[in-house]
Amino acid sequence: MMVSEAPRLDAGVERTSASRADFDRFFARHYRATVRLLSAGGAHAEDAVQEAFTQAYTRWSKVSTYDRPDAWVLRVAVNRMLNERRRLRRLDRNAHRMLERDAIEPAGPTDDLAAAIRLLPPRQRMALTLRYLADLDIAEVADAMEISEGAVRYHLHEARAALRDRLAEDATETRP
């Protein structure tokens, strides 16, 4: 959906041109401000705001009667973001559990790596899992872990250093 235009959801919904124009003005006036308000929520903010305005459009005959329809849209967008954060948190917990399970232990030459990862503190292990196994970027990892991007970078740095040291020790111990 383009940022500059209102959601187009006319399928099966009859709107008068007056209510359509009213919504279009509302959208043009409040969309960017709502995105800016929620932009600290990360990459999902704009999607949440778009979905909230889509909901407002489908219920415009009721939402337009509220004292502050913009507050309603903001609340819906915040709820969407919170739901997404909860979903990511559940994914984190599941990824964390998977790393702890011995049944998933890799076979062959990566046994040392799996053992070294299991020895990492939980936050470092979670950051590594989300960044490199789930392929999330730093901002997404920060949102999922509910920490700052700087903290994510710190945990990743510490985890890589610990793995490097541990694997180097293992390599020197196995040499004759």
Image (cartoon, rainbow, N blue to C red):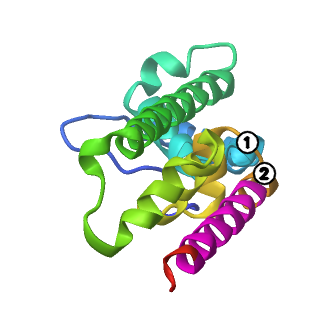
Residue 168 magenta: yes
Badge 1 density bin: few <14, some 14–19, many ≥20, Cα 10 Å: few
Residue 29 visible in this rendered orientation of the protein:
no
- What residue is shown at x 71% (from left), y 41% (from top)? 38
Q: For the point 64% across and 29% down, which residue is it? A: 74
Magenta span of residues: 154-172
The amino acid type of the residue labelled 1 equals: Ile
Judge from the rendering whether residue 29 lies leftward or rightward of residue 92; answer left or right: right
The image's mark for residue 147 is 1
Position of the N terminus, as image quadrant, is bottom left
Q: Is residue 164 magenta?
A: yes
Q: Image quarter for residue 57?
A: top left
| SS type, badge 1 | loop
Of 56 and 80, nearer the camera is 80
Position of 115 with respect to 160 (left or right) is left
Q: Position of residue 70 (x, y in %)?
A: 66, 28
The residue that label 2 is drawn on is 151
Picture residue at 37% right of the left edge, 35% below the top = 16
Label 1 and label 2: CA atoms lie apart by: 6 Å
Q: Nearer the viewer, residue 37 or 142?
A: 142
Above or below for 64 versus 88: above
